[in-house]
């Protein structure tokens, strides 16, 4: 557990967080390599099943990063995403995985520092929580 | 549509505890529309169940299927090629779908994943409200298209009662008084006179009062 390095999946909106990650890179800001970025056209594109599958496949934490309130390129994708994240948090609490492994983060394209800080904060938080309990469990041979 | 809500995960996990391979079956009709048991919900529940099992060091093999209609034998028949591989079936359809699977596959345990709630309509995205109780003798033509059986807490046929305040029901201040809605609608239609007519006592035998019901259409029966 002491050497536990969490794997974190970050679904990043093309219009804000993904660009903010670029900004962080341009500014030579350091952030933990634990965060694996998946670029999405809008945070509203992230469905509940995407978050569930990430965790089922062994991610220790997941966050969805969308635009600041009122700034969504598609009007309300970030609000929709936040509601889905809240739904998944409850479901994860119900099955004992822990809703705190999933978060919704808002930022703008210019917030390179916030992107780097979020990645660091989330990594630290998940490191404290420990590995996803399903990570090392035997997997069923699903035909689905 | 028939509306439903997923049961608590604890209950679902408990009833599946003895099994390792299940068939999780959704329905493309009402429960898809009310986001309780369509293809999407099948995927999410499948993932949640597997994670819950993995957490306990167990495995659960889930075959996901979503039928066009679980309440029709033609579609339930599609499970034939998969049923033998499963130790049990969990259905995300309404009670009709669950029972149809149980009737067709007598040797297979079937569990409901949702609580079937009511026949309703979408008020807005994510909100469904009860609109019909299937009483078997529709009075909507007399009540301006607002059902006093499904929407009046007391099922009054000649309302409102004294509990109607500012258009709301005394049962819940967020609940519309059905008879206020009926009056408003009759007024809008310019047929307030209709309100003065007494609606005769209802024959509840057309509803559940007569036991389980059946419709037989002689022109269609084969």
Image (cartoon, coloured by chain):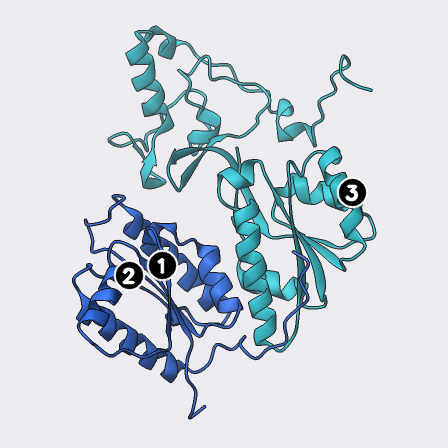
Chain colours: A blue, B cyan
- Element marked by disc 2: helix
Contact between marks 3 and 1 (CB within 8 A): the answer is no
Circle 3 or circle 1, nearest the eye: 1
- Element marked by disc 3: helix
Q: Residue at x 33, y 49 (%)?
A: A80
- Disc 1 crowd, CA 10 A, few/some/many (<14, 14-19, 20+): some
Residue indicated by mark 2: A18
- Mark 3 belongs to chain: B
- Circle on res. B219: none
- Mark 2 belongs to chain: A
Residue B122: which quarter of the image?
top left
Q: Where is residue A21 in the image (x, y as percent from the top left)?
A: 26, 66
Q: Position of residue B189 (x, y in %)?
A: 32, 9
- Disc 2 crowd, CA 10 A, few/some/many (<14, 14-19, 20+): many
Q: Which of marks 2 and 1 is nearer the N terminus?
A: 2
Cα–Cα gap, marks 3 and 2: 52 Å
Evaluate whether label 3 is on the same chain as label 2.
Answer: no
Residue indicated by mark 3: B103
Cα–Cα gap, marks 2 and 1: 6 Å
- Mark 1 belongs to chain: A
Contact between marks 2 and 1 (CB within 8 A): the answer is yes
Residue indicated by mark 1: A39
């Amino acid at each position: 557990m002491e050497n536990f390095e969490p794997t974190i999946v970050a679904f990043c909106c093309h219009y804000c967080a993904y660009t903010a990650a670029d900004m962080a890179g341009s500014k030579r800001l350091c952030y933990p390599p634990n965060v694996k970025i998946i670029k999405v056209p809008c945070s509203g594109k992230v469905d509940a099943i995407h978050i569930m599958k990430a965790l089922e496949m062994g991610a220790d934490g997941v966050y969805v990063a969308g635009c600041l309130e009122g700034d969504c390129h598609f009007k309300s994708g970030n609000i929709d995403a936040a509601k889905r994240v809240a739904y998944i948090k409850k479901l994860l609490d119900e099955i004992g995985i822990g809703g705190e492994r999933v978060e919704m983060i808002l930022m703008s394209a210019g917030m390179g520092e916030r992107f780097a800080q979020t990645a660091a904060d989330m990594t630290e938080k998940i490191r404290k929580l420990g590995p996803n309990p399903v990570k090392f469990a035997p997997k069923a041979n699903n035909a689905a | 549509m028939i509306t439903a809500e997923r049961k608590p995960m604890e209950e679902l996990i408990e009833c599946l505890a003895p099994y390792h391979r299940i068939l999780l079956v959704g329905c493309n009709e009402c429960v898809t529309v009310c986001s309780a048991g369509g293809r999407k919900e099948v995927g999410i529940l499948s993932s949640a169940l597997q994670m819950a099992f993995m957490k306990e060091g167990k495995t659960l093999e889930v075959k996901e299927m979503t039928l066009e209609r679980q309440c029709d034998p033609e579609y339930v028949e599609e499970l034939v090629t998969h049923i033998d591989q499963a130790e049990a079936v969990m259905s995300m359809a309404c009670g009709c779908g669950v029972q149809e699977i149980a009737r067709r596959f007598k040797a297979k345990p079937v569990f409901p994943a949702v609580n079937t709630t009511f026949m309703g309509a979408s008020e807005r995205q994510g909100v469904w409200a009860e609109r019909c109780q299937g009483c078997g003798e529709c009075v909507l033509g007399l009540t301006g298209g607002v059902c006093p059986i499904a929407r009046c807490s007391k099922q009054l046929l000649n309302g409102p009662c004294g509990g109607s305040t500012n258009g709301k029901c005394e049962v819940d201040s967020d609940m519309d008084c059905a008879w206020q809605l009926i009056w408003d609608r009759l007024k809008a239609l310019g047929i307030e006179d209709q309100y003065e007519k007494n609606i005769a006592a209802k024959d509840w035998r057309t509803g559940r009062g007569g036991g389980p019901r059946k419709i037989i259409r002689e022109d269609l029966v084969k």
